[in-house]
Amino acid sequence: LTINTLGKRSVRRPRPLLDPVPAVRHLKRQPITTSFPSGHAASAAAFATGVALESPAWGAVVAPVAFSVAVSRVYTGVHFPSDVLAGAALGTGAAFAVRALVPTRAQTGPPPRPRAQAPALPGGAGLVVVANRASGSADRIRVLRHELPEAELVECEPDEVKTELAKAAARARALGVCGGDGTVNAAAGIALRHGLPLAVLPGGTLNHFAHDLSVEDGRDLGRAVREGEAVRVDVGRFTSGDREGVFLNTLSLGVYPELVRERERWSHRIGAWPAEVLAVLRVLRTDRHPLRVELRGETHPLWLLFVGNCLYHRLALTPGRRTDLADGQLDVRVVHGGRHPALRLLSAALAGPLTLPHSRLRSSGRYPHPAHAEARVSRLRLTGVAAGTPLAYDGEVTDVAGEMTVEKLPEALTVYRPLP
């Protein structure tokens, strides 16, 4: 797009004369734009370079095709050689520019520290993996069976996951889990209680924790288990009265838990995506604040309180993710109460990448931004939480009331992770 607009309109080089080119090589439809640079060569080079950056082997397959596209522009007489060379150079540069704007997980994976001692299990002997059948991860399980043929695999229904995890922990040297973030959360709690290393095979829809670990599939996990490659990661913990739990990803109060409940109420009737839209419309159509909390002695109406286990970064166009799973911090963000909740939430979402890392929630009630604020803390205490307030953590929802404490358990959990 840039080449065909800015490039061609800036240079305005006329096309080559067709007289020296044999008629058999002429295109049936001649281009009407200017000549410099070649858009076809740029597109081919950008695509081939992008493929090669992700997979050198596939890049080698695609490169001759891209080269043929570029040469054909000279062969048919519609471009000068310099048009093609300039277009290919610009296309290659575009591929690298996009890679910089949208980093791959290989570029932004968590640092391989702090390394942990975990048993190396050649063949997987001693590893018991509990898989949630509802996650639809049969292909991933087959790969793991091939990578770790001696591992014990237990497949069960969602309501049996916690029971099977507890049974597995009693006989395992390492506890494995395959499922979504809620299933992984249950496994993490049991692994903590039994002092076992955890092996996570992504099997859900989003798989935030596994992907932040740079575990993409059974091959990655199999290598880490065979070699005993592992790291220690932080765990978040919340307590409220007799309710307590841990979270590996996020915890939230306010609009989001209500959205989750509303979505679950309708998803089995109308499907997941229609239920998501309906939940948003029903929850955000009112100006009633879903949450009021006391923070440092002052009552604050909030639309959303988000707590991340470690700092969530937003990298250019990519959604938020973590590059360090043992930074000792809670990533706290709030969207303040007020009219027009949808606009406030949208403002906070758009401004998220621009929010300064050192900004703080202020005790005076005046915030660094009228719609949202953020802080980095190791412990958070809230009081005055209304009875029955829903709390979402790693995709699960429970109720809290009264006083609530959220804190870090630094480097509390050992997880298998392939190291560079």
Image (tube, rainbow, N blue to C red):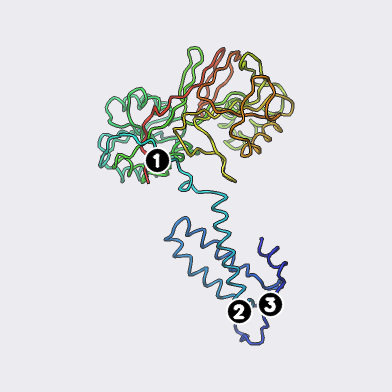
Mark 3, Cα crowd under 10 Å, few <14 / some 14-19 / many 20+, is some
Quadrant the N terminus occupies: bottom right
The secondary structure type at the circle numbered 2 is loop
Q: Which residue is drawn at 55% across and 65% down?
A: 45
State which quadrant residue 119 falls in: top left
In the current view of this chain or complex, which residue is farthest to the right?
339
Q: Tag 3: residue type?
A: Arg
Residue at the farthest front position:
358
- From the viewer's perspective, tell me whether residue 270 is left or right of residue 56: right
Which residue is the site of mark 1?
Answer: 112
Label 3 sits on residue: 15
Mark 1: few/some/many CA within 10 Å (<14, 14-19, 20+)? some
Is 60 on the left or on the right of 258, as rendered? left
In the rendered view, tell whether residue 382 sits above or below residue 255. Answer: above
Between tags 1 and 3, which lies in front? Answer: 1
Task: Give percent across and percent down for residue 359.
Answer: 62, 30
Q: Where is residue 204 in the image (x, y as percent from the top left)?
A: 46, 37
Disc 1 element: loop
Determine which residue is flagged by label 2: 76
**Vertical placement of 315 versus 173: above or below?**
below
Type of the residue with mark 2: Thr
Going from N to C along the chain, the mark reached first, 2 or 1, is: 2
Mark 2 vs mark 1, CA separation in Å: 52 Å
Q: In this view, does 386 lie to the left or right of 339?
A: left
Looking at the rendered structure, the secondary structure element under dot 3 is loop
Circle 3 or circle 2, nearest the eye:
3
> Hey, what amino acid is under mark 1?
Pro
